[in-house]
Amino acid sequence: MSGEEKIFFQEAFDSNWIAPLGPQVDAFEKEVADYVGIEHTLALSSGTAALHLALEVLGVSSGDIVFCSDLTFVASANVIRYQGATPVFIDCNMVSWTMCPKALQKAMDQEQKPKAVIVTDLYGQSADYEAIYKICNAFKIPVISDAAEAFGADYKGKKCGGIGDINILSFNGNKIITTSGGGMMLSHNEEWIQKARKLATQSRENAVHYEHKMVGYNYRLSNLLAAVGRGQLKVLDDRVEKRRIIFETYKNALSNIDGIDFMPEADYGISNQWLTVCTVDPKKLGIDRNKIIHAMEKENIECRPIWKPMHLQPLFSGEKLYAIVETPNSDKLFRNGLCLPSGTNLSEEDQKKIINIIFTQLD
Ligand SMILES: *Cc1c(COP(=O)(O)O)cnc(C)c1O
């Protein structure tokens, strides 16, 4: 927390708006819209809720296909199942670890046309939207940008969370800024946001009594949590700067080691470096990723493998994956990928300790 949150939180208390709506929610929606550079925003209880409503708004239902990044967090794909639709996974490329446009093109040529494409901005790095739009526009297929991990990042001078036809952000406790739990849907299309707003409030019709024509959800963000979000928003750019320094420090210390490679930063954007992620090649290094994780564990330091690709999840066994290489890139990355401690409150001293543990393992 930055300290600023308390001021807005007190405001929320004083106004007695202790509800999933209120002045803090309205202000938070407007401030995020201004930051991202997009007209319409809807504050929600989670990023997952935002993804779910994105599919609802686009009319995705059973029998439909939705393309989805293979290397992502499970929330991106779970929502496809909520709708009874079928996911088709698209491999990543090695230059950005985000959706491979060539694999997307291959799926578009060979597969039933999808109702939407869900593209993840991975670990704070934007996908290559120009290349993706070139393919999707040819068939007028909407792009949902899952920017949950990439708030504060850029793609060609535009903010992530404002590039897709529908965009989602997350303010979960592990993200670069947080409301403890929360999310947002963002779009240039006012009609979609209005529709989602109604769905998120139990699809209540405009009447004095409680009138409902369709199924709805209880997905709005609490006014108290929106107050926290407003305070956090003030330090978003500082957080990005800090995470980028953490990334640079790891990179300077470790990238000369033959066998450790960092997730490349694509030249089209600026990553928020939400997590510093690298691969550990056991053939070159003599030790594998898991050995480093265990060594850290002994020192009470948490390290984890990168996301397990969706096509390898038991939940999605039997679903298709499109890749342009024999062994999918996501498999290769998952085998050796390691997330290093990257919290904004990581001290220089602690980071030195982490780096030293890695060096000790190499001896
Ligand atoms: C965190 C995350 C989500 C889900 O956000 P919640 O607010 O936790 O529901 C979705 N997609 C990706 C890529 C994420 O990292």
Image (tube, rainbow, N blue to C red):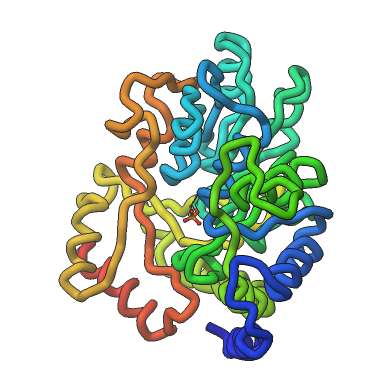
Q: Residue at position x 27%, y 31% from top? A: 314
* Residue in front for this viewpoint, 57 or 206: 206
Quarter of the image that includes the C terminus: bottom left
Residue 54: x and y in percent read 63, 40
Whether residue 128 is visible to the viewer of this picture, yes or no, is yes
**228 left or right, relative to 303:** right
Q: Residue at position x 51%, y 41% from top? A: 97
* Vertical position of residue 326 compared to residue 16: above or below: above
* Residue in front for this viewpoint, 238 or 17: 17
Q: Residue at position x 68%, y 79% from top? A: 234
**15 left or right, relative to 245:** right
Picture mark count: 0
* Residue in front for this viewpoint, 289 or 139: 139
Q: Residue most toward the front?
A: 209
Q: Residue at position x 63%, y 50% from top? A: 168
* Vertical position of residue 217 compared to residue 109: above or below: below
Residue 21: x and y in percent read 66, 67
Residue 130: x and y in percent read 75, 36
**121 left or right, relative to 343:** right
Whether residue 127 is visible to the viewer of this picture, yes or no, is no
Residue 99: x and y in percent read 56, 35
* Vertical position of residue 250 compared to residue 170: above or below: below
